[in-house]
Image (cartoon, rainbow, N blue to C red):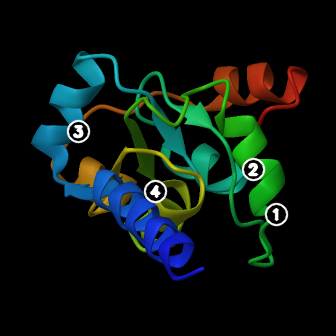
């Protein structure tokens, strides 16, 4: 019995060592996007419409307007975007909500590398980086029931 517990503990430790959350700045975000790492914008529709989005972002609300979340349903929608072996970037308004979402992806869903945009879309825009209108992406993800 003792060996089983030890083996399970070692397996969990090895798995946790592989999982990594990396806070990134805007220059790193730009490089990762150019290299093809998908960006998941976890904000609400109203937030996307207010500021626009990073070009190519996948719109996938995590917390609704009331602060509620359904992690299992959300994770099901992430899988077609990136599998656990693939790196993924998460962005929100200021980098706060994505801290918890990054940990969920890394620790509970087994994503090996999760990039958290430290200052969110507000930081991206503060440095005058480009955003695009969210409307076409919202229309597409609503039609596919993936937002």
Mark 3 lies on residue? 29
- Say whether marks 1 and 2 touch (CB < 8 Å): yes
Closest to the observer, 81 or 140:
81
Q: CA distance from mark 1 to mark 2?
A: 6 Å
State the quadrant of the N terminus. Answer: bottom right
In this picture, residue 84 sits left or right of residue 113 = right
Which numbered circle lies on residue 106? Answer: 4
Q: CA distance from mark 4 to mark 1?
A: 17 Å
- Say whether marks 3 and 2 touch (CB < 8 Å): no
Mark 1 lies on residue? 70
Q: Nearer the viewer, mark 1 or mark 3?
A: 1
Closest to the observer, 38 or 85:
85
Total marks in image: 4
Residue under the image location 51 percent in, 67 percent down: 8
State the quadrant of the C terminus. Answer: top right
Which numbered circle lies on residue 133? Answer: none
Q: CA distance from mark 3 to mark 2?
A: 23 Å
Q: Position of residue 65 (x, y in %)?
A: 77, 70
Q: Nearer the viewer, mark 3 or mark 2?
A: 2
Q: CA distance from mark 1 to mark 3?
A: 27 Å
Residue under the image location 58 percent in, 31 percent down: 58
Mark 2 lies on residue? 74
Q: Mark 1 or 3 closer to N-term?
A: 3
Residue 29 visible? The answer is yes
Q: Nearer the viewer, mark 4 or mark 1?
A: 4
Crowd band around label 4 with a 10 angstrom C-alpha radius: few (<14), some (14–19), many (20+): many
């Amino acid at each position: 019995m003792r060996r089983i517990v030890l083996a399970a503990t070692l397996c969990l430790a090895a798995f946790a060592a592989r999982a990594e959350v990396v806070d990134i700045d805007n220059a790193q975000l730009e490089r990762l996007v150019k290299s093809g790492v998908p960006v998941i914008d976890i904000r609400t529709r109203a937030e996307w419409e207010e500021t626009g989005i990073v070009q190519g972002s996948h719109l996938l609300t995590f917390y609704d307007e009331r602060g509620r979340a359904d992690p299992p349903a959300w994770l099901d929608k992430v899988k077609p975007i990136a599998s656990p072996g693939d790196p993924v970037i998460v962005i929100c308004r200021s980098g706060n909500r994505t801290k918890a979402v990054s940990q969920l992806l890394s620790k509970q869903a087994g994503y090996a590398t999760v990039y958290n945009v430290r200052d969110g879309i507000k930081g991206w825009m503060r440095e005058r980086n480009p955003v695009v209108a969210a409307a076409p992406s919202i229309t597409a993800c609503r039609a596919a029931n993936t937002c």
